[in-house]
Image (cartoon, rainbow, N blue to C red):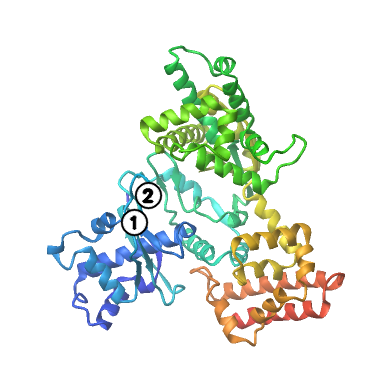
Amino acid sequence: MKRFVKILIPRELSQNSLRERLLGINSQYAENDKFIQRASSFLKMLYVKQMTIADSYDDGYVPLMANITARFLGNNVKRQPHYYKTYIDTLIQCSLLDVKKSYQIGTNSIKGKSKEYKVLLSNENDKVIDQLEKKILLSNNIVHNIDHQANIAKLSIDEEKYVFINCLLSPSKRKQGINILDHISIGTYFVKEDQNGRVHSIITRLPKELRCAFTIDDMQIYEVDIKSCQPFVFLRTIHQELNYRKKKRRTLEEWGEVHPDIGMYLSDTTSGKIYENIHRRLKKLKKTEPCDPDELKETKLKVLANVFFADIPSSIRGVTRHFNDLYPTVFDILCNLKQKYGYKYISKILQQTESEIMIEAINSLDTAISRIRLHDCILCTKDNVETVKGVILSTAFNAIRVMPTVSSGLWGLEFRQLIEEYTSWGKEMSDLFVMLEINKENRDKVRKSVFKKTDLLEEQKGGVYYAKLNELFDPTKEEAVERERNTLYFPHHWKKANYQSFNNFYEREINSIFNGKLNDTEGWNKEYLMSIKQSWLDYFHYKN
């Protein structure tokens, strides 16, 4: 196994650049090669964390426990300069590191908080190919998954579409998206397998909006997964606990007859409707009333976070109360296991069981079939969907002894629809949500109104909303243009021709969108639209 992995980093983090910085501040460590090598590795590791899971951190600050930092940089003050505080102070003096020094020691009632670190860069787009030791990127209990890496390599990317969509995302996601594309271009996928059997890679960290830019063998990607997977795989633990506690060996169906709520849980999980049933009860919806997809997703996250993965609650309320009312025996089993082994035990056994099913399914498929495992689902092409479905059903039944519901669909379907709707409604509106840096709640509210109801669009026509748009995209205002220039990112491996191609692509999109709107002036200000169209065209020509 290779000891190093290739990564793309800003030139400022390279050892040569760091040496120049140290010389610039007359540091006594400027000629200490070991100091420079270790400091550079620390900055690279921090940068990779910022880029690969950017949305998990607040403003790019990465929390690191003191013992981890000390183990990485040195924890013996007598071995100066190889002591972690010396490294941190020196990097702060070089203006390469910022530290939020506030921290909280954890107790039984208070969650601890570590110091947070952020790499500071003056030119993030100037990147070079470098290497980093795998043991720095991956912890000791992680195994490199060669098969998964080979399958990821089969993915194809429509780069123009990828970058086009990436420019619509929030600034942190844009950085993350371009960092991912950069590393895919050099064949680095950051593949690792955790203790619970889950495989993590650059694809699992991919922003969902960018999924529609990928294909396998030039064909659209479909995902096949078990509906309500984690509540379903918990059936095996329920079965084991009931047989052990009651000192009787029965099937799940038989236990369902003894405990009606177990029978209901069994029916709801095998049909994949457990989240929907809890949501209907929570929102007091009738059976004939449709569930709002966004609200249903929120309920699903609450069930997993508050019922399965949280500690034993001091008081039962909200979604936890509804779960307890519907499935009291299941909730009792959950609480007993958490009390006996700790609340993290539940997530561990669920992920292990889920991984067991998916690993067996992947291994059962013909090696000629292009497939990629993504946590609780398998990605494949349309012609292999039914084959993958059959294999997942078979392996799930062997593991749980009941049959689940397996679903399939286009990978990133909701965002494919979003892009189609966005194209039909006008690019200027979709980009505006990001450019004005509207907070997520308002941005989603505006997006829903524009794409579904259109009432907010009419409401704000000609108002402050449009005035801000004009101000931001007026190419004569260099400050606004420069501000936006700093938030758009392009792949490292793109040359001048690709920049031109990208701008041509944008120009075609702008023309096709605005020409359609200009032909239908009902509810629109034609003169205003023409000025916005020209601003967009001038803006992208200016950037090039």
Badge 1 or badge 2: first in the primary sequence: 1
Q: Residue 469 in the image: x percent, y percent? A: 68, 76
Q: Is residue 414 left or right of residue 398?
A: right
**Would you say residue 30 is visible in this rendering?**
yes
Query: Which residue is at the far front?
Result: 315
Element under disc 2: loop
Q: Is residue 30 left or right of residue 7?
A: left
Rounded to the nearest whole Å, what is the CA distance between mark 1 and mark 2? 8 Å
Instruction: Quickly name the residue at label 2.
Output: 110
Q: Residue 281 in the image: x percent, y percent? A: 66, 36
Q: Is residue 534 left or right of residue 407?
A: right
Residue at x 23% of width, y 66% of height: 85
Query: Which residue is at the far left?
Result: 78
Q: Residues within 10 Å of mark 2 (few under 14, many from 20)?
A: few
Element under disc 1: loop
Instruction: Quickly name the residue at label 1.
Output: 104
Q: In terms of image quadrants, where is residue 246? A: top left
Q: Residues within 10 Å of mark 1 (few under 14, many from 20)?
A: few
Which residue type carries mark 1?
Gln
Q: Residue 224 in the image: x percent, y percent? A: 60, 39
Contact check, label 1 and label 2, Cβ < 8 Å:
yes
- Taking 134 as reference, is 167 above or below it? below
- Taking 264 as reference, is 181 above or below it? below
Residue at x 60% of width, y 36% of height: 227
- Taking 326 as reference, is 149 above or below it? below
Q: Residue 13 in the image: x percent, y percent? A: 35, 70
* Quadrant of the frame with the C terminus: bottom right
Pick the residue in front: 387 or 61: 61
Pick the residue in front: 85 or 490: 85
